[in-house]
Amino acid sequence: MPITLCMADFDLATRSASGFLLRYIAPRVEPVQLLSVLVRRLPFRLAVPQSDIIVGAGHGDVDAFTGQHEDVLLEVGKYDPKEVKGKVIKLISCQCGVELGPDLVRNGCVAFMGYMDDYVWVMDSDYASTPWDDKMAATSLMPVVEGLNTLLNGETAGEALNVELEGYLRNIEVEEDELIKSCLQFNHNNAILLGDPAASVRARPKVAFPFPPPPLIPLFGGGIM
C-alpha cells in the first residue's frame, strides 16, 4: 500500500515543514505524494483509501487539519471513516491531538501521532526556496524526520515517537539559543501517541539522499504555524 504524503507549501511555516518531508521522507515512499496545489480535499479523499500511512504538514486546529491555503482535509464529523480505518497517521500541525486525533482513533485509525498544542520552531525566511537547508528549523524538524524514518523502517508507532522525543532532548542538551531550546521543550511536551503503540506498517526500503530536490518556487506572502 502507498503512503499519502501531504505537503502544503503556501506560507513559510508549511513550506518549512513540508521541505523536510520532501527532502528526507518523499524519496523513501511510493506515491501518492500531494504537494502544493494538490494538497486539497478532493485529491486527498481519492488517495487515502489505498494508503496504510497518512503523513501531513499543514495548519491545524483542535478539530481539523488543513492543506494548501487551509483547505480542510480532515475535520471531526466531516470525513468518511473508510479514509482513516486501519491507518497510522502523523500530522505535523498545531493542536490536532486535542479533538481530531481521538476522533480519528474512534473511527478506526490504529495509531495517531500529533501535538496537543501548537507545533513551534524557528525558521529562516532566507531558505524559503530550499527549506531543508535551514539549520535552525532542522533542530526541531529533524527529530520528526527521524521518528518517521523509524516508522518506515517497520518499527512501531511507539518506537517512532520515542525516537522523536529523544531527538528533542538530545538537541536541547547542545542548543545554546534559548528560544530554540524552549521550542524544542515545548514540542517534546506536547507530542502524543493515541491508539495502539504497537501499530506498525510495511517497511520501506532505506535509501541514501545524495542530492536535495530542486529549489521550490519563490514564496509570496508569509504566515505562521
Image (cartoon, helix red, strand yellow):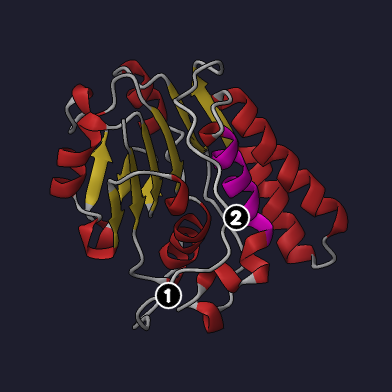
User: Is 38 positioned to the left or the right of 111 in the image?
Assistant: left
Is residue 160 visible in the rendered image? The answer is yes
Helix, strand or loop: magenta stretch: helix
The residue that appears at 49% across and 66% down in the rendered structure is 16
Q: Is residue 56 magenta?
A: no
Which residues are drawn in magenta?
Answer: 139-150
**Residue 20 image offset from top left, x and y in percent:** 52, 59
Q: Is residue 67 left or right of residue 28?
A: left
Badge 2 amino acid: Leu
Viewer-nearest of labels 1 and 2? 1
Return the residue at label 2.
141
Name the residue rendered at 38%, 54% in the picture.
Answer: 58
Q: 224 or 86, which lies in front?
A: 86
The residue wearing badge 1 is: 214
**Alpha carbon separation for disc pair 1 and 2:** 20 Å
Q: Nearer the viewer, residue 2 or 172?
A: 2
Provide residue 50's location: percent of width, then percent of height.
23, 31
Q: Amino acid at mark 1?
A: Pro
Q: Position of residue 83 (x, y in %)?
A: 22, 29
Identify the secondary structure beneath mark 1.
loop
- Residue 40 is situated, as x and y percent measured from the top left of the image, at 20, 53
Residue drawn at the location 42% of the way across and 75% of the way down: 214
